[in-house]
Amino acid sequence: MNFSSRDRSSFLFRLKNESFDLLVIGGGITGAGIALDAASRGLKVALIDKSDFAFGTSSRSTKLIHGGLRYLKQLEFGLVKEVGSERAIVHKLAPHLVVPEKMLLPLHEKKGLGYWLTSIGLKVYDFLAGVQPEDQRRMLTRHQTLKAEPLLRNNDVKGGALYAEYRTDDARLTIEIIKAAAHHGALLLNYVAAEEFVYTDQHISGITATDQFNQTSFTVHAKAVVNATGPWVDELRERNNSRTGKRLHLTKGIHIVLPHYKLPVRQAIYFDVGDGRMIFAIPRGRVTYAGTTDTDYDGDKNNVVATRDDAAYLIRAINAMFPVVALKPEDIESSWAGLRPLIFEEGKSASELSRKDEIFESQSGLISIAGGKLTGYRKMAERVVNLVIRRHFAQYTLKKVNTHHIKLASSDWDTKEVKRYIHAVATQFAVHNLSFVAAQELVERYGMQTKIICAEFEQLANIHPAPLALLLAQLKYGIRHEMVCTINDFFVRRTGLLYFNIDEVRQWKDAIAEDIGSILNWSPERKKQEVALLNELLSAASADL
Ligand code: FAD
């Protein structure tokens, strides 16, 4: 499969000159899932994103593949059941990337549901999500809770519960689904924006699009068009004159990243803040990240950032739960902020709105999907593609849905094999003084594809210091196999380093800019521009919090 940004012009040529069964607008997890589902059933599919794949909410979530315990509180049993059972499927499809993580839920005298209601609630959660007996919830005494998380001392915690969740990297999950769709024949392009809809006999028959790098415009022809633009869904419905009835309600959620030694939680923890909200603190290698918030948003959707107030709210909540850590705003290393594309409901606050997905269909044939969860992407895709088939291709003989068998990152292995492979890579890295964590992060990022990166790394390590050689090996892989077009694609959405190792980005950004610029033949002006864009992100993630 060819998915190299050096071949972008030939992909653009095909986009302009071929005609598609289905055009998907938006390359977040929702659009990616739809493209994979449709292409694997035999439709001829194109997908475009105005920015990078996973530029929107799909790189800015809490990065959990979770059953959504809070939805149980909202009595959304159907949603809990669907996303709960999807977790196990997505874990099997990408065991390196969707990693089991026990979540600790501390319980208090006066906050939350209380011991017995939580015990029953988690039992229902396990039942709905079909959790295996060995992974089912375990209730803890105060003593056991403090042993599991000593940072909770000096806190009025009464007991706790441990239950099963999975952690992931949202942007990497999205890019693996994008690559799987490409493998099944879909044509997928980042940095191509959908502008206006094109109609034949008052029915959508395509769109005009703009290549964001050279501002050329062209028409893309397709029998069916799906709008999977997350927070931008209503903008496209507006251009289709179909923003009627239900509409989106955007809320912002932020996360902050701290050095792990500043918030040394032993495992992921989900705690009650006391204002009706719950917050996650999740250890991840050398850092711990915490979030999230839920506030109404009507600002610039292309530039969503954490503010000082957002960060202060999280710091206050963390300090109240773990009095011994005494965090200060200056401890924050990095941050991110994302928008939830929720469906507006009269009289409901941000936290009360349903996280369920909804499909809107316009008279001229535009199918839009909004809401939902990262975790439920496969089922959402199935529903959308079923509708597309009913409307346009009922007479086609298409394959049945089999996305539950399509491995991501060709990972035909299980958790044990992933762990064994991490140890093998760590042994190779030890020769170069690279840490175990570096090996673990690499394997959890790329799965089996790590082998290609390690081979490249061995060559580069003869010329460069090992940490830079490892970055350059990933960059080359990203350009050749993951459509990396900009420095930010690499540092934000292919490696997550801007969030999880921001100092490494600062240290090596010039060397990376040099390499990507020479591979992609950038002019000096283009290189300057790209570096400036990275610097903007660096300061938005870390400054002034
Ligand atoms: P997006 O990811 O936003 O993708 C939309 C894409 O459309 C963007 O890439 C954008 O560039 C593109 N686009 C827009 N306009 C155009 C155009 N005109 N032409 C071409 N492309 C266009 N879910 C979970 O399961 N687990 C979690 O832990 C979790 N945590 C969350 C935490 C927060 C703070 C938030 C905000 C959400 C969280 N979610 C979580 C929900 C989940 O992240 C979202 O439901 C999901 O990422 C939405 O994906 P999407 O593809 O619909 O939208």
Image (cartoon, rainbow, N blue to C red):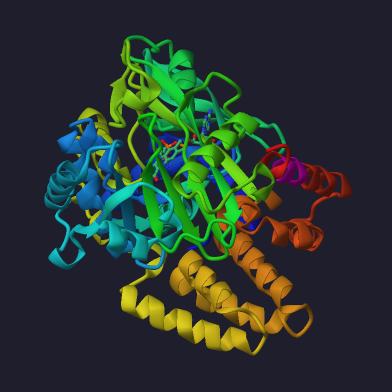
Instruction: Residue 490 in the image: state x and y as whole percent.
Output: 64, 55
Instruction: Residue 426 in the image: state x and y as whole percent.
Output: 54, 83
Splitting the image into 4 quarters, where does residue 268 fall?
bottom left
**Front one among 365 and 321:** 321
Instruction: Residue 249 in the image: state x and y as whole percent.
Output: 42, 20
Classify residue 536 as left or right of residue 154.
Answer: right
Total number of numbered labels? 0
**Front one among 423 and 72:** 72
The picture quadrant for ligand 1 comes to top left
Q: Confirm whether residue 6 shows in the render.
A: yes
Classify residue 174 as left or right of residue 91.
Answer: right
Q: Residue at x 76, y 62 (%)?
A: 508
Q: Residue at x 32, y 47 (%)?
A: 375
Query: What predominant SS class does the magenta segment belong to?
Result: helix
Residue sitting at the far right: 524
Measured along the vertical axis of the image, is residue 294 above or below residue 90? above
Instruction: Residue 171 in the image: state x and y as whole percent.
Output: 49, 50
Q: Confirm whether residue 44 shows in the render.
A: no
Classify residue 402 as left or right of residue 211.
Answer: left
Magenta residues (range): 533-539
**Front one among 367 and 448:** 448
Quadrant in the picture for the C terminus:
top right
Measured along the vertical axis of the image, is residue 280 above or below residue 385? below
Classify residue 468 as left or right of residue 34.
Answer: right
Splitting the image into 4 quarters, where does residue 224 fall?
top left
Q: Is residue 93 inside the magenta stretch?
A: no
Q: Residue at x 61, y 24 (%)?
A: 300
